[in-house]
Amino acid sequence: MTTIGTRLEKTVSGPQRPRRARARLSPRADFAVRRIGRLLTSLLIVVLAAFFLIHLVPGDPVRAALGPTAPAALVERTREALGLDQPVPQQLLNYLSGLLRGDLGTSIQTGLSVGATIASRFPTTLTLAALGFAVAVIGALPIGMGAALLARSGRGRTANSGIAGLLGVLIAVPDFVLSVGLIAAFSMWLGLFPPAGWGNASHAVLPVLALSLGPMAYLARIVQVEMITVLDSTYITTARAKRLPQRVILLRHALPNIVTATLTVGGLLLSGLVAGTVIIETVFAIPGAGSTLVSAVGTKDYPMIQGMVLVYAGMVLAVNLVVDLILITIDPRTTIAEG
């Protein structure tokens, strides 16, 4: 009877269709997709902001590029060739369609492709930023850890106060002031390094120091605070109770637990270093993307400004994205906090 009743029930209710399982991304994949979506949205906002802001700047970029004595007919032909005679909305559509094709336009000042110019100048900027970041991290870790040990010992309060004051000064001094000071001290007075240019290792010393000292000081303070917190934790007390050597306690137990905060701040500093190369390259006459951007602003080179701003913004956003992805790999709780 039970079998017959079951068959009748299935006949009345109709054939049962298997339920499809809803496809869901893993928390990490969902985190990455949302971050990439934010990156693309931010890039679009940067493109629109850069386009409209530079078009609000008074002056004729074609006249600035060709000079005040250029014939009016030549100026008009150049303006038509660059599409600057069209309405601003049409210029924006042309620019966006060019971006979708990978075309950043042509420089008004040099007549060269913006993409080719960026490809030739940006490696220098990336090298400068990478060296500055490496020096900042390598210097900040021992300084911050040493300052934390001095602060906890109670016997090195004077030295700790001196280190804290020096780090505060380095954080507060602007990059261009620090650059001028380094040139005066190590180039003009001591004659150890060249004051400008880019070509060999000696040319990189002063620009890298000027770019990295401020971020190194800031990161050292973060490392110091995090290290003091970690050294006061229970598992460090347990490690000391086991009479482990100080070196083992610091490197094996304390250092890995300050990586998350250090990496987060370090990623932000790397973004700042990429943007800070504009000032450093200008002061030290380095032929990179930053000095090219400053020159383009001075000559109102619309395509070059838009291309450089887009690449700089893309680099900063890409660095933040990579740091976020590394953080969710090291500490999956980041995805929970984000959700």
Image: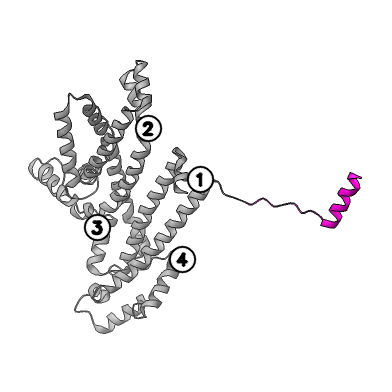
Q: Quadrant of the N terminus?
A: top right
The stretch in magenta equals 1-24
Question: Residue 185: percent from the left, percent from the top?
Answer: 10, 43
For label 2, the residue is 257
Q: Nearer the viewer, mark 1 or mark 4?
A: 1
Disc 3 is placed on an element classified as helix
Vertical relation: 18 (above or below) 167? below
Of residues 245 and 214, the one nearer the viewer is 245
Left or right of 63 on screen, residue 112: right
| Disc 3 packing (10 Å; few <14; some 14–19; many ≥20) | many
Q: Please, what is the three-letter code of the amino acid marked with disc 3? A: Ser
Of callouts 2 and 4, the N-terminal one: 4
Q: Which mark is residue 100?
A: 4
Vertical relation: 87 (above or below) 232? below
Furthest-left residue in this view? 189
| Disc 2 packing (10 Å; few <14; some 14–19; many ≥20) | some
Of residues 102 and 270, the one nearer the viewer is 270
Vertical relation: 116 (above or below) 133? below
Left or right of 33 on screen, residue 312: left
Q: Please, what is the three-letter code of the amino acid marked with disc 2? A: Asn
Q: Is residue 61 magenta?
A: no
Disc 4 is placed on an element classified as helix
Q: Which of the 4 quarters of the picture holds residue 104?
A: bottom left
Of residues 122 and 112, the one nearer the viewer is 122
Question: Residue 70: percent from the left, percent from the top?
Answer: 22, 79
